[in-house]
Image (tube, coloured by chain):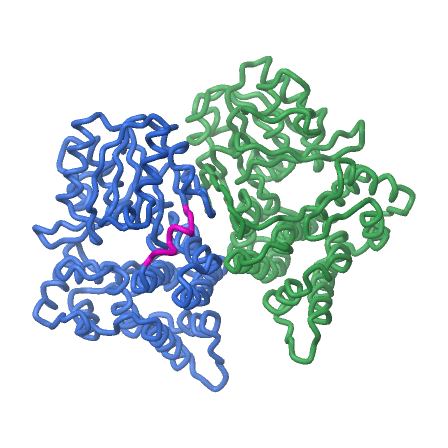
Chain colours: A blue, B green
Amino acid sequence: MNSFQFHNPTRIVFGEGAADRIGELTSSFGKKVLLVYGGGSIKKTGLYDRAVKQLNDAGITFYELPGIEPNPRLSTVNKGIGICRDNGVEFILAIGGGSVIDASKAIAAGVLYEGDVWDFFTDKAVIQQAMPIGTVLTLAATGSEMNGSTVISNWEEKLKRGAGSPHLFPRFSILDPTLTYSVPRNQTVYGSIDIMSHVFEQYFSLTENTPLQERFCESILQTVIENIEPALANPNDAAARANLMWCGTMALNGGQISLGMVNDWASHGIEHEISAIYDIPHGAGLAVVFPNWMRYVYKQRPGRFAQYATRVWGIDPAGKSEDELALAGIQATRDFYTRIGAEARLADFGIGDDQLDRMAEEAVRYGPIGNFKRLEKDDVREILRMCL
Amino acid sequence: MNSFQFHNPTRIVFGEGAADRIGELTSSFGKKVLLVYGGGSIKKTGLYDRAVKQLNDAGITFYELPGIEPNPRLSTVNKGIGICRDNGVEFILAIGGGSVIDASKAIAAGVLYEGDVWDFFTDKAVIQQAMPIGTVLTLAATGSEMNGSTVISNWEEKLKRGAGSPHLFPRFSILDPTLTYSVPRNQTVYGSIDIMSHVFEQYFSLTENTPLQERFCESILQTVIENIEPALANPNDAAARANLMWCGTMALNGGQISLGMVNDWASHGIEHEISAIYDIPHGAGLAVVFPNWMRYVYKQRPGRFAQYATRVWGIDPAGKSEDELALAGIQATRDFYTRIGAEARLADFGIGDDQLDRMAEEAVRYGPIGNFKRLEKDDVREILRMCL
């Protein structure tokens, strides 16, 4: 276990009916608010009207930034920064999933920065301050509701990049599992795979002596695996939706489950290059990339993959070599993803091999990626080729 | 899973050498500090000199409250309140284990309260504010370093009571596992049992649908069980000491592992009555009480105890009824405690049956205790009798 620091100031308000506290919690931070949301599903479900009523009742003046894209775009972030500056906005309220929250964080950092907000995503500048934000989560997936990270796509340059800062932790996050009852089947699948992928990035680590952290990771993986199919079979399954939502938050809340471990994040880097060009859902890309990344890297520490196979998937180790066990666990992952309806290949999205070189090049733009195995351009291209 | 709120603002600084940051972290909160510590072990180990040098180097004026008792006393807390008031102290630095931290929290709340600080422990008043405190942990056990709870003994009235408030979360806690290398064998045992007991209070719950929370609990229990004996065999085992320390913090950091679960806390209530009269170590009392509490209550939900037996102790369920499995898990707990050197009976401390009635009476002074099974006076007396 390595040394670490941990501080997570986000206040979580979890449970059925938590969304009735939007007005109360928001009003303690400001009376001029930017309301950020996505493609309109919150209007269909009635959540928009519910939030607007609470904001009005609390005497809050609010401006709106609708239409956040599934891979939120820099141009939209800049639009939000403009609205905040023009109107003296004091607080940003994000209602949606990871894209909406990430866009809101970027806006929060950009408003108080004189330069181009994209500087934060290209390591040209460090976030020194940010406006306060709060979130109302509508999709179990991101973890962004309880961490200081954001990922934004620069569509003009076909780049998707992350930034992070302690200033970006939401002041509060409302986690009301009933808001996820209306999440469509494919988004439930992709969101759950996103959660599992966040755990994988932490769990497959070369750091020694992290037994508690490993078990926390396995706990989330097992719980997600148990709850996806009940949620798919009955979208209003209160227990399954609550479990998936809490797993999503715990999977990526400032790295708490893996403190003192070196994380990997190569697969996210590779997926970002795919969705930066092809705009496929993040979780869908991860479902394709991760099993192939696993096959490519497992020999770095086959014991961790063997442990994963036995503890998470319950695979009997009897008569199997460590490598066989490791590969069985990887195959179990792929089989499960296929069973719940996630695509296995880039070809399923009509993606061919014509951009492989460019994606590999971009992935290592700032140097090799990943820590479990450091991946050079050729490694990334090979993993992408395996994904075809 | 029930609805919940969660907010834990404590900053954790974990790792070898973290204790070199005492001066830096303290000085960001004030220049007049009360230094609280225990019986002098920090002088023997050199930690006192190390802290004093850092405080001096940081230009901090500090006052001292040494001699905090293993069960910290109200009289000592009042002494600390007096020192703070007389000298305009701005920040309290607790260097020690749970007793020192708990005393510091009580002082922090008492300084800013006009009435008797004991009011907070008898539900006569609610903590509305507190001075900021920071901690340097020297014993893996309490969890107090990352939560808002404190337990104090009123020696005159032979009462031991708890209080809690969001205002009592330490602003920072330094967790340097090397500081625990010098912890004696028996305190390592009792501290580890304290950690396990904190988990038991959360894990044995009647709340439905908490699979992630249960696994988090089991993760800590398994990790503590794995690491106690290595730490006893080699007190300088860096890995074991680090794991025990992190388990202790995660076991009781504002209830994070069991959010949405109803907790029990009857065994702690019973143990408090024992140590309020006999002043035995908290962990030693819990080692006696918990297995007996388990036997007394397991029929409320034998399935949870059966799960405990299989998942935590690896007991093969084949051919066993649920009750048999539950009892095997309880016996495994007792056997393990005995193997690591914890006393099994109150008689081992020279405690007889003469105060049973008084302890039972006091335990239910404010009504029945516990939630897994509500315990009336007769139940408590019976559990105490089983402990004799």
| In the image, residue A176 lies in the stretch drawn in magenta | yes
Quarter of the image for residue B145 reads top right
Percent from the top left, x then y, of residue A90? 28, 28
Q: Is residue B103 above or below residue B110?
A: below
Q: Nearer the viewer, residue A19 or B128?
A: A19
- In the rendered image, residue A304, in percent from the top left (x then y), is placed at 41, 69
> Is B341 in the magenta?
no
The answer to whether one can see residue A2 in this image is no
Q: Residue visible at 79% across and 56% down?
A: B344
Residue range (magenta): A175-183
Judge whether residue B254 can be spotted in this image. Answer: yes
Examine the rendered structure and indicate whether residue B365 appears above or below residue B371: above
Residue shown at the point (57%, 34%) measured from the top left: B95
Q: In the displayed structure, does residue B261 sit left or right of residue A215?
A: right
Image coords of residue B283 (percent x, y): 70, 48
Q: Position of residue A311 (x, y in %)?
A: 48, 70
Q: How many marks?
A: 0
Depth order, front residue of B88/B302: B302
Question: Which residue is depicted at the point 34% across and 61% down?
Answer: A188
